[in-house]
């Protein structure tokens, strides 16, 4: 009963910022897998009870999202982890659901080489700023992931139909057509 009261209060206040953001599902737990290396990390990156960020957990997730071409890792913006965490929650997936990272942080060199080779990479991509991820969620069509990500209005979202991956970033709320 007390929990229900708290939940209702949170809804009423709608800014109940247990996790620093609006009351969107998100438990501060993520399972990320690097598509290229197959490495997987299950990390509680926000700690109960108040949802404080855990630096060791953030680093573990950032390492999974490193630039695998150069080996460089960069501290990923925690807001991106919150975005992905909210997304799996909003899709109704269990906390253990695996999110596959097809591209995370990119060094400028890697981003430039992608552009030279005709890849769909923006010159000042949020990947370079460690604020973007290209993701796949096994068992969930990319189009559905992208539609839900857009609804959350946490940043940029694009669905790449040819590879069935979804780009998410924590830049301005926007979306674009890709193929
Ligand atoms: Zn991307």
Image (tube, helix red, strand yellow):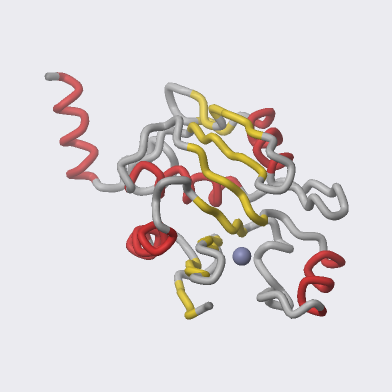
Give coordinates of residue 129: x percent, y percent.
71, 61
The residue positioned 38% from the left and 35% from the top of the image is 18
Up-down relation of residue 171 to residue 47 (above or below): below
Would residue 24 be visible to someone looking at this image?
no
Quarter for ligand 1?
bottom right
What is the number of callouts on the image?
0
Give the residue displayed 72% in from the left and 48% down from the top: 36
Residue lying at the far top in this picture: please name it: 1
Choose between 23 and 138: the one closer to the eye.
138
Which of 71 and 76 lies nearest the eye of the viewer? 71
In the rendered structure, the answer to whether residue 117 lies left or right of residue 144 reads: right
The answer to whether residue 51 is visible is yes
Q: Quadrant of the N terminus?
A: top left
The quarter of the displayed image where residue 152 is located: bottom left
Q: Above or below — where is 140 with respect to 52?
A: below
**Residue 9 relative to residue 175: left or right:** left
At which x and y percent is residue 115?
77, 77
The residue lying at 63 percent from left, 58 percent from top is: 131
Q: Quadrant of residue 89?
A: top left
- Residue 55: give x, y in percent of width and height: 67, 31
Q: Identify which residue, 140 or 126, lies in the foreground.
A: 140
Q: Position of residue 45 (x, y in %)?
A: 56, 31
Residue at image position (84%, 54%) is: 69
Which residue is nearer to you in this view: 160 or 129?
Answer: 160
């Amino acid at each position: 009963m007390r929990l229900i009261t708290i939940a209702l209060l949170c809804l009423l206040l709608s800014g109940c910022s247990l996790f620093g953001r609006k009351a969107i599902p998100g438990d501060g737990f993520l399972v990320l897998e690097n598509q290229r290396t197959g490495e997987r990390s299950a990390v509680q990156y926000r700690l109960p009870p108040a949802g404080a960020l855990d630096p060791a957990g953030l680093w573990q997730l950032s390492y999974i999202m490193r630039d695998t071409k150069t080996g460089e890792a960069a501290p990923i913006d925690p807001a991106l982890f919150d975005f992905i965490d909210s997304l799996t929650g909003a899709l109704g997936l269990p906390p253990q659901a695996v999110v596959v990272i097809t591209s995370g942080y990119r060094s400028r060199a890697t981003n430039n080489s992608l552009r030279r080779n005709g890849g769909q990479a923006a010159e000042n991509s949020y990947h370079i700023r460690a604020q973007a991820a290209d993701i796949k969620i096994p068992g969930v069509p990319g189009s559905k992931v992208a539609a839900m990500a857009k609804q959350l209005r946490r940043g940029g979202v694009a669905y790449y139909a040819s590879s069935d991956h979804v780009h998410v970033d924590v830049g301005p709320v926007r979306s674009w057509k890709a193929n």
